[in-house]
Image: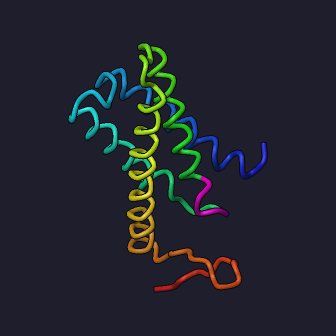
Amino acid sequence: MTRDTAETLGPLVTGAVSAAAMQGWTGWWLNSGAGVAWTLGMFFLLTALVGTSNTRSPWARPVALWVGCMTGLTASLFWVGPGTIWPIVLLVSSVLTAGTIMVGIGVGRVRAYLLDGRLHVRGRDGTHVRSEP
């Protein structure tokens, strides 16, 4: 297993299992406001804690987490029966989860900066520049 695979496999599986588990607990998450709040809250926390750790690519783990979440949500949707508007449902799901994961990335980076003093940004030439406090 390569290093890149090892960095993304954990968030991928975590996202898929947690998304499917939330559907078992709340029912289909877009059917109620509480389901939306609980599911997006869980995705936000997962991203802030798991998806933003120090890796080669700042996007590898969050994207893997999003793909895992969408895989779990899609599997749950087809398990209960997709209905006739399933493409629209998956589009809405992907937009909501992607937005939540983007916010989680920002919060995770701020948390990393405040706790560890590390903030990785890209320089003008595309290389990583480490910011010191």
Q: Nearer the viewer, residue 107 or 35?
A: 35
Residue 78 higher or lower than 11, as above or below: above
The picture quadrant where one finds residue 37 is top left
Question: Could you say where residue 11 lies in the image, as x and y percent from the top left?
Answer: 55, 43
Whether residue 4 sits left or right of residue 42 in the image: it is right
- From this view, report whether residue 101 is shown above or below residue 42: below
Task: Give the total of numbered labels.
Answer: 0
- Where residue 116 appears, as percent x and y from the top left, is 46, 72
In the displayed orientation, state which residue is furthest to the front. Answer: 84
- Residue at left offset 48%, top offset 51%: 50
Magenta stretch: helix, strand or loop mostly: loop
Q: Identify the image quadrant of residue 33.
A: top left
Give x and y (percent) for residue 109.
Answer: 45, 67
Instruction: In the rendered view, tell whether residue 90 sits above or below residue 49.
Output: above
Q: Quadrant of the C terminus?
A: bottom left
Q: Is residue 58 magenta?
A: yes
Residue 37 falls left or right of residue 72: left
Expressed as whole percent of the image width and height from the top left, the position of residue 4 reads 72, 51
The residue lying at 42 percent from left, 38 percent from top is: 93
- Is 87 a magenta residue? no
* 56 relative to 131, above or below: above
View extreme (right): residue: 2
The coloring applied to the image is rainbow
Classify the position of the N terminus by image quarter.
top right
Residue 81 sits in quarter? top left
From which residue to which does the magenta span run?
56-60
For the point 38% across and 51% down, the residue is 100
